[in-house]
Amino acid sequence: MTISALRTLAVLEALSQAETVFGGRSRSWTEVAAVWVDLRPAGHREAGDGAARPILTETAEAEARSGVAARGMRLKAGGEPWRIVAVQPGRPRPGRMILKLERAWP
């Protein structure tokens, strides 16, 4: 894969927490970096127990230049947030990384 294949501009976000004036906790996503990725769908699965609506979980892979991505962060591509479940640095070659992504639909 060449650099020209990295055609989708995405944003890496990390979860930030702060204390509110009332003593509670506020959680929000903060932009960490903008990266060019090659986003590829990998499949989907459906989970449910019959009593509740099933949840559809979509999976994808994103190839990008190596950067600050870590498990637990999220990648926002095309306005859709994806949870990063794994990062494989140095694959498919040095200087690149593969991000394993998931998002759930209620």
Image: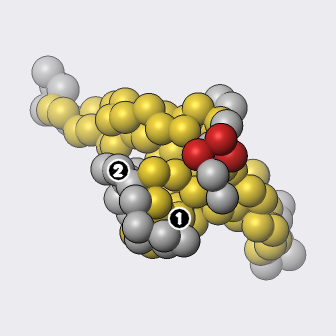
Secondary structure, mark 2, is loop
* Image coordinates for residue 45, horizontal then vertical, percent: 80, 72
Q: Which residue is mark 1?
A: 98
The residue closer to the viewer here, 76 or 20, is: 76
* Image coordinates for residue 10, horizontal then vertical, percent: 55, 35
Total labels: the figure holds: 2
Q: Residue shown at 18%/26% (left/top)?
A: 20
First in sequence, mark 2 or 1: give its number: 2
The residue closer to the viewer here, 6 or 70, is: 6
Q: Which residue is mark 2?
A: 67
Q: Residue shown at 15%/32% (left/top)?
A: 19
Q: Is residue 93 above or below residue 49?
A: above
Structural crowding at the residue carrying mark 1, measured as other residues with C-alpha within 10 Å and reported as few (<14), some (14–19) or many (≥20): many
The residue closer to the viewer here, 38 or 26, is: 38
> Splitting the image into 4 quarters, where does residue 40 fall?
bottom right
* Image coordinates for residue 13, horizontal then vertical, percent: 40, 39
Q: Looking at numbered disc 1 in the image, what kind of residue is underneath it? A: Ile
Could you tell whether 94 is left or right of 54 in the image? left
> Splitting the image into 4 quarters, where does residue 58 fall?
bottom right
- Circle on res. 35: none
